Amino acid sequence: MSYTVEKLEKSQVKFTFDVDAETFEKAVAAAYGKTKHKYSVPGFRKGHVPRKVIEGMYGKEVFFEDAMDIVIPEAYSEALDKEHDIEVVGQPELESFDFKDDGGVTFVLKTAVRPEVKLGKYKGLSVERKVDKVTAKQVDEEVENARDKQARIVDTDAAAEKGDIVNIDFVGSVDGEKFDGGSAEGYDLTLGSGSFIPGFEDQLIGVKKGDKKDVKVTFPEDYHAAELKGKEAVFECTVNAVKKKELPALDDEFAKEISEFDTLAEYKADVKNKLMKDAEMRADRQYEDALVQAVVDGAEVEIPQAMIDAEAEDMAKEFEYRLSYQGVKLSDYLGYINMTRDQLLDEYKEQAAKSVKVRLVMEEIVKQEEMKFEQEELDAKIAEMAERSGQDVDTFKKGLGKEHYDYLANQILSDKLLAMLREQNAPAKKAAAKKSADAADGADAEKKSAEKKPAAKKAAPKKAAAADGEAKPAKKSAKKSEDSAE
């Protein structure tokens, strides 16, 4: 067997294989051995019909298709073993298969390969790290949230206001007919929460315990239940109770109750510090994201569709996995939102393309920078994860497969890569470098200026000054020159 390789556009290559007659004959014989049990011929036991008899009945090409299924994978695998610089990223596509007069065959396979990445600038980038300021309003909102969690819910005979909780029984109907899911008893509804369809909660403002009220609403056109879209409905509501939130006083006692501090001022200061730490962490994440995006935007890579499709499939499977944790099947979810799995994959395609490009660019930087990790680093990462899971290291290791080790190795390299990008693009470092460059430019300019002046003319005034007893100004001038050079 021989073959040739041709690089195509869009990160694809074409293999053209030439299989000799002897090799193809071996494949045909192997195909006969695998499939002969399928043929029944009078006078022969099933599975023992001679090859020539079967070929005589069905034609000599009867085993060719199965022989192709043997020849193609073997030839392709052999070629990939030899072509070490080719990394395929998808399944091969059979473009043609032809039989030769001498009994051999030729066929052409086209496949997507890992694309070449042309890196742009990834050091010294002008990416700002911005930290959001923490305002007094934010601190007050956090304190109010904590206060709200400590609120007591008390029954009241007063009319319901926005923010109050009404406990209701309701029965919904469309055109006088009740519908599924339109009725409930003892339901606690917070007015203004937006839990029910628009207009429902507003009509309950002002009700009191014991009131009965018909709430008339129209279902939105995009409502999930098709039979209710755009329909007018009436909900017969009975108000069982109206409840109000009774907030604790905002004082030192409140601070003592919910924190380790003795005063409200100390508690608020702690809240502010935590918000500031959150802002710093958020700034770090956003800065890293912006750095990565700047690096990716500056790189050039032609991503084959096969990689995008595979990434979209992985995203769909991950989504399906998350749904299963909530006890929901993907098929049920898709039926609920009236979407097919293919449409879901299409939704992921754009995001998948971006994700693949990020991965390819980051991997190329790791390669260019020759980043590696030591076994000690991997052991430390494993020990850290074992501790989190509450297991000893040896027990934890027993549950790890190759994919887990690969994941941890990638995580270590990813951490190293981000650390390098932060170091090489740090705003403070760039500012210092600019200051140093400006100083160097200034020194060069002064040097060039000095070089332009004739040495004899520069020396003469000093001698004259010394003769007149005016040496001090000359020394002062020299000192100033030295300071400037520094």
Image (cartoon, rainbow, N blue to C red):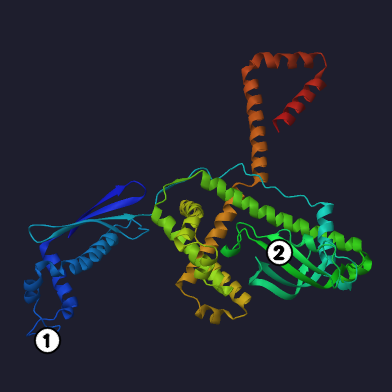
Q: Which mark is residue 196?
A: 2
Which residue type does callout 1 highlight? Answer: Arg
Q: Is residue 381 visible?
A: yes
Residue situated in front as seen by the camera: 354 or 464:
354
Residue situated in front as seen by the camera: 477 or 437:
437
Image quadrant for the C terminus?
Answer: top right
Placement of 305 over or under 236, stated as above or below: above
- The residue tagged with tag 2: helix, strand or loop? loop
* Residue 140 image position (x, y, % from top left): 84, 57
Image quadrant for the N terminus?
Answer: bottom left
Which residue type does callout 2 highlight? Answer: Phe
Q: CA distance from mark 2 to mark 1?
A: 73 Å
Instruction: Give the left or right position of residue 418, taking residue 270 as reference.
Output: left
Instruction: Give the left or right position of residue 467, taking residue 357 as reference.
Output: right
* Residue for badge 1: 45
Toward which corner of the image does residue 184 lie, by quadrant? Answer: bottom right
Q: Is residue 260 visible?
A: no
